[in-house]
Image: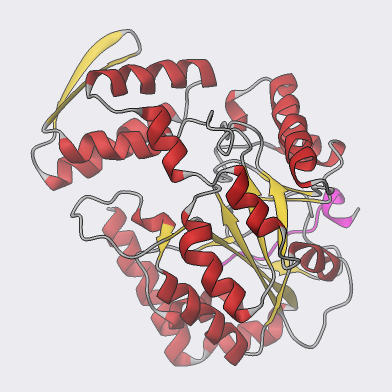
Amino acid sequence: MASDNRFWRRARMELAYFSGAFRLKQRQSGGAGAILRFERVRPRRSARFQPLRTREITPKFLDRTIRALKRWRYDIVGIDEACRRAVTLPERRRFVCLTFDGGYKDLVTHAYPVLAKHGIPFTVYLPTAFPDGLGEAWWLALEDIIARERRVSLVIDGREQHFTVAELSDKYALFAFLSGWMRTLAPPELSLAINDLCRRYSVDLAQMSRSAAMDWNDLARLAADPNVTFGSATVNYPVLSNLKDADARREMAMGQAVAQAAFRRDVRHFAFPFGDRDSFRRRHVVLAEEAGFASAVSTISGIVEAEGRTNLHALPRIAWDGRERSLRMMRVLLSGIMFAPVQPTRASRN
């Protein structure tokens, strides 16, 4: 079903491109621009089982994207400028803001050389437990275990469950099921579940998480570049909708405080962990504003409108699917033709 949806979505985008409809939409929409969301940037892997491939692009694709944005005459701006354009009259040229989530080490090793070569601004949203070596990248451990095993057992809702995953399709189905289940758990239960699974299958979760994440030395290198803006993504990267409001507020405040102390600068922007419609609620938008953030970004797809028609504390982003390599698709998405128009709300006019 997911592959069918992807096929029809791509067909719609191809039609929009070759018919020229995306150009008309871009002229009519009045949108100020778009925020692109990336996660991992590293060379393509040959493994057959890659459930997280949607979150990865290659350094070559990043380079192609930046060159294309310049060719299409977009202004590539930082998040502060994106927020300014979101509340002012539309400008002649639309903007694109590049953002990177997760704090992965390959941002320094593979993405930064490309970004620095082009001399463009970009934003990094950081969950601060990870450079301290305390974060748990449970999704990476889950991928590793299912990739290696033919049978996976764990406790779900107090009962021992067993899954046979000899076929590739079984592995993808189990990853989707278990990652979806784990995202419903409160942080203590999630930590218990993934650590139990890692013990069973001899995975060093702490080491895996540390090796995948930037440390403070990596971050200091980025901080020396004036083109880099740091935003906060809490401390532990929890699903906020699984937390009590007091705990969500504490995650926001502590993540901001740690980042500000480390970088000795204001951290004014926030990213909702995971950022989809199931991961945060309207009350978390209010909490982000009350915490003093100038903006908060989601992974809900959409275009940023001008004149205050988009809520700065629920900014949409275009999360690029790493399985796609077509810049035609990128251009169609940036036009806004695939997204429903943003409806003005009281919050978005403030």
As for residue 347 lying within the magenta part, the answer is: yes
- Magenta residues span 339-349
- Tell how many labels: 0
Q: Which image quadrant is residue 151 in?
A: top left
Q: Nearer the viewer, residue 58 or 18?
A: 58
Q: Residue at x 33, y 7 (%)?
A: 158
In depth, the one of 230 and 96 nearer the eye is: 230
Q: Position of residue 234 (x, y in %)?
A: 66, 36
The residue sitting at the top extreme is 158
Residue 73 x/y as whole percent: 66, 90
**Quadrant in the rendering for residue 117:** bottom right
Q: Which residue occupies the foreground of this view, 176 or 101?
A: 101
Q: Is residue 173 visible?
A: yes
Is residue 338 among what the camera can see?
no
Q: Is 69 placed left or right of 45 in the picture? A: right
**Residue 340 among magenta residues:** yes
Residue depicted at x 58% and y 57%: 100
Asked if residue 295 lies left or right of residue 137, the reply is right
Q: Position of residue 318 (x, y in %)?
A: 56, 63
> Is the residue 103 above or below the residue 256 in the image?
below
Q: Position of residue 155 (x, y in %)?
A: 29, 14
**What residue is at 24 percent from the left and 24 percent from the top?**
202
105, above or below 21, in the image? above
Say left or right for 317 vs 208.
Answer: right
Picture quadrant where residue 3 is located: bottom left
The answer to whether residue 233 is above or below residue 155 is below
